[in-house]
């Protein structure tokens, strides 16, 4: 081994952060393997690397015995004493067996070991960098596509966006810039394998943290998220400070903040609701934009029966049950939705005479039913939806 190689190893220690001892240990192990392979030797050998002189020597390790049965592993006491009179039975003798042309083999082996170790070190650095970014959001560039994955360049590594994690309302093309959520970082044989997602609820959470300073600094807290990617999501927010409007902070002035996120998610609808410790209030909020007349809680089953105006039953349930499904996932409560008519027939509204003032039962089909307005003289009027239609 030349002094150039020693200098190269020292330089690698500085540039790549690979310990010289680690490199030399790996080199010794590789040289032993190379010696046995190239010189058809199966005996115990030790490789000695002299950094100062840049020399490599191979020593065969043999046990001192009375009678030699395997000359590759054993040496007679007489022969051992000819090397050093202090050797005794059972001692290990090291005899130099460095081949004449071992320098060339050593140089090739050293190159392979150094290259491999550098590659491993770089993989280790990348893995360490990205394991800390797990559950985080990054911007990447679409490189190529196949039937299983979209390959996204994240700078130092290429991430995999599986088909199951792609949004159904998006079309991806090479060179597109997209924000992705890192779901898994694995240290595979070929290097770090990073899996990303566009459908994970965590992506929505991170987008709100980027867009809403109040969430980033902890003034507003995201309590729960339910998402059907590409179609609709619900997010529950809460502010401990009663003077802070948690929902308003997320929506932004004229809806600017939430609209930025909607645009990033290619038009995915987002309902922002206020979280509450009270399941009655929380479930009612979660069913937004539908109005709720009454919420009956069944604690032991962690289930609720929700009564809504007849004319808002379909709105509360949503298209293919989506609104109710997302609300249940958001709150963690089972939700059974009934119209006022069904609830009355089931006797669920007997104690709700006062609360029913919010909705005019004679005109359940009108969203304006039961709303109070004032005329020019300041008199309170209840608007009749039939009269409104006549106007």
Image (spheres, rainbow, N blue to C red):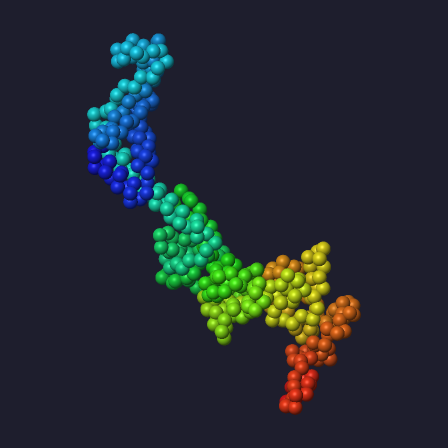
The residue at the point 44 percent across, 58 percent down is: 137
The residue that appears at 29% across and 38% down in the rendered structure is 114
Q: Position of residue 168 (x, y in %)?
A: 49, 62
Whether residue 64 appears in this view of the structure is yes
Query: Does residue 148 appear in the picture of this structure?
Result: no
Q: Quadrant of the N terminus?
A: top left
In this image, 301 relative to 87: left or right? right
Q: Position of residue 108 (x, y in %)?
A: 25, 35
Q: Left of 168 or right of it: where is 301? A: right
Q: Is residue 51 above or below residue 388?
A: above
Q: Position of residue 98 (x, y in %)?
A: 24, 24
Tell me if 65 is positioned left or right of 306 in this view. Answer: left
Residue 366 versus residue 217: which sits nearer the camera?
217
Q: Measuring 28% from the left and 10% from the top, which residue is drawn there?
A: 85
**Residue nearer the viewer, 168 or 157:** 157
Q: Quadrant of residue 151?
A: bottom left
Q: Residue furthest bottom?
A: 377
**Nearer-the-camera pick, 89 or 364:** 89
Residue 77 to residue 114: above or below: above
Locate the C terminus and report the quarter of the image it occupies. Answer: bottom right
Which residue is pictured at 27% across the width and 25% down the height? 58
Q: Is residue 163 above or below residue 214?
A: above
Q: Quadrant of residue 294?
A: bottom right
Q: How many marks?
A: 0
State the image coordinates of residue 223 (x, y, percent, origin top left): 57, 60
Image side of residue 254 versus residue 157, left or right: right
């Amino acid at each position: 081994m030349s002094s150039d190689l020693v200098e190269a190893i020292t330089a690698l220690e500085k540039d790549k952060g690979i310990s010289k001892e680690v490199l030399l240990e790996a080199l010794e192990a590789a040289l032993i393997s190379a010696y046995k392979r190239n010189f058809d030797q199966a005996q115990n050998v030790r490789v000695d690397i002299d950094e100062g002189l840049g020399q490599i020597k191979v020593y065969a390790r043999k046990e001192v015995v009375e009678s030699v049965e395997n000359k590759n592993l054993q040496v007679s006491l007489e022969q051992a004493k000819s090397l050093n009179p202090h050797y005794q039975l059972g001692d290990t003798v090291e005899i130099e067996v460095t081949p004449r042309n071992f320098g060339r083999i050593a140089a090739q082996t050293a190159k392979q070991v150094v290259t491999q170790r550098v590659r491993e070190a770089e993989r280790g650095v990348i893995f360490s960098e990205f394991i800390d970014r797990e559950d985080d959001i990054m911007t990447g560039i679409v490189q190529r596509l196949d039937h299983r994955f979209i390959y996204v360049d994240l700078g130092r590594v290429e991430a995999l966006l599986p088909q199951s994690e792609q949004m159904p309302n998006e079309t991806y093309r090479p060179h597109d810039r997209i924000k992705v959520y890192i779901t898994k970082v694995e240290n595979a044989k070929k290097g770090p394998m990073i899996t990303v997602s566009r459908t994970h609820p965590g992506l929505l959470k991170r987008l709100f943290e980027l867009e809403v300073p109040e969430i980033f600094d902890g003034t507003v807290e995201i309590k729960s998220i339910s998402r059907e990617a590409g179609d609709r999501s619900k997010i529950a927010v809460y502010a401990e400070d009663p003077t802070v409007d948690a929902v308003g902070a997320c929506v932004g002035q004229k809806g600017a903040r939430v609209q930025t996120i909607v645009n990033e998610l290619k038009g995915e609808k987002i309902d922002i609701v206020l979280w509450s410790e009270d399941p009655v209030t929380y479930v009612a909020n979660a069913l937004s934009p539908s109005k709720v007349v009454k919420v009956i809680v069944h604690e032991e089953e962690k289930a609720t029966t929700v009564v809504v105006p007849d004319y808002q039953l379909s709105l509360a349930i949503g298209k293919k049950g989506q609104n109710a499904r997302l609300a249940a996932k958001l709150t963690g409560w089972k939700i059974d939705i009934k119209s006022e008519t069904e609830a009355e027939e089931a006797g669920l509204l007997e104690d709700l005479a006062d609360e029913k003032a919010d909705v005019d039962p004679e005109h359940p089909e009108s969203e304006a039913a039961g709303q109070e307005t004032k005329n020019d003289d300041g008199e309170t009027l209840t608007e009749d939806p039939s009269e409104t239609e006549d106007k």
